[in-house]
Amino acid sequence: MSAGSGTGGPGENLWLSAVRENPEHARGYAERWRRLEASGQDLHGEARLIDAMAARGSRILDAGCGTGRVGGYLARAGHQVVGVDLDEHLIEVAREDHPAVRWETVNLTALDLREEDGAQMLFDLQVSAGNVLAFLATDERRPALARLAEHLAPEGRLVVGFGLDRGYAAEDFGADAAAAGLHLEQRFSSWDLRPAADDFLVGVLGRASRHSSRA
C-alpha cells in the first residue's frame, strides 16, 4: 500500500509520539474529558449526528474511540457498538465507563474485526471523531482508510472529522480516501453540518464501488 499523497503530514503517529515523550499523556487526556463532562459541557455533538443517521439498532464502529465518549452515547441510544483505539489506557477507561460495549486495542492500520464464525465484521456506520485521522503518520493514512473501507457494509457510511490545520489537507484526504476505495459523498465544516470551510472537515464517505455501479 502506498503512502498518503500529501507531503506535509507527520513522519510518525502523533499520539504514539506524545505518549513516548510523556508516559502520562493518555491518563491526562482521559482525566480532561472526565472533568469536561463533570462540568456540564456538551460533549456529544458528534454522537448525536451519528445517531440521527442510523436506524435503530445499527452496527456502528467508533474508530479511534479514546475513552468511549462517542461510542458510549451510541450504545446507550440502542446501537450495537464496537470501539477501537491504539492506546491501552484509553481502552481501559472506555471499558470501565461503558462496560456493555466491545472495546478493542488496535491500530487502525491493522483493523481486522471478526464475527464469532470468523467472518469479517461489517458496519452500517463508522465514525472517526476527535482528529483521529490527523494523528496518523502520513504512511498510515491510506492503509487505515482501506481497513475501514473493508469493514463498511455495502450501503454503509464512514463519517470523519478533523481540523484542517493539523497537517492533513482536504485534497490529500480526498486522494487518500479514493485510493482506499472510498468516495467522499458530502463535506461540512462542523458536526452540526455547517457548509464546508477551510478550518475543519466533516466528511461523509461511502464505498466507491457503490457509486461506480450507479454511474
Image (spheres, rainbow, N blue to C red):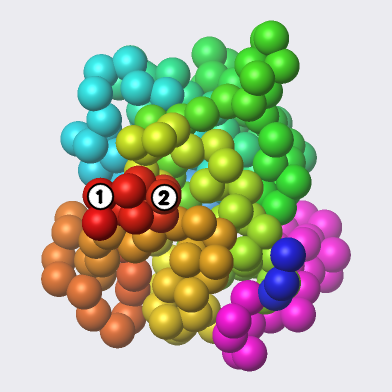
Please report the residue visible at 49 percent of the width from the left and 64 percent of the height from the top. Answer: 177
Query: Is 155 or 34 nearer to us in this picture?
Result: 155
Q: Which mark is residue 214?
A: 1
Outermost residue, top side = 117
- Tally the marks: 2
Magenta stretch in the rendered image:
4-27
Q: Residues within 10 Å of mark 2 (few under 14, many from 20)?
A: few
Rendering coords of residue 162 (x, y %): 43, 66
Amino acid type at image mark 2: Ser
Name the secondary structure under disc 1.
Answer: helix
Amino acid type at image mark 1: Arg
Evaluate whether residue 72 shows in this view. Answer: no
Please report the residue visible at 33 percent of the width from the left and 73 percent of the height from the top. Answer: 200
Query: Is 107 or 147 nearer to us in this picture?
Result: 147
Residue 20 among those drawn in magenta? yes
Rendering coords of residue 155 (x, y %): 34, 36
Tag 2 residue: 209
Rendering coords of residue 93 (x, y %): 63, 33
Q: Who comes first in sequence, dot 2 or dot 1?
A: 2
Image position of 154 (left or right of 2): left
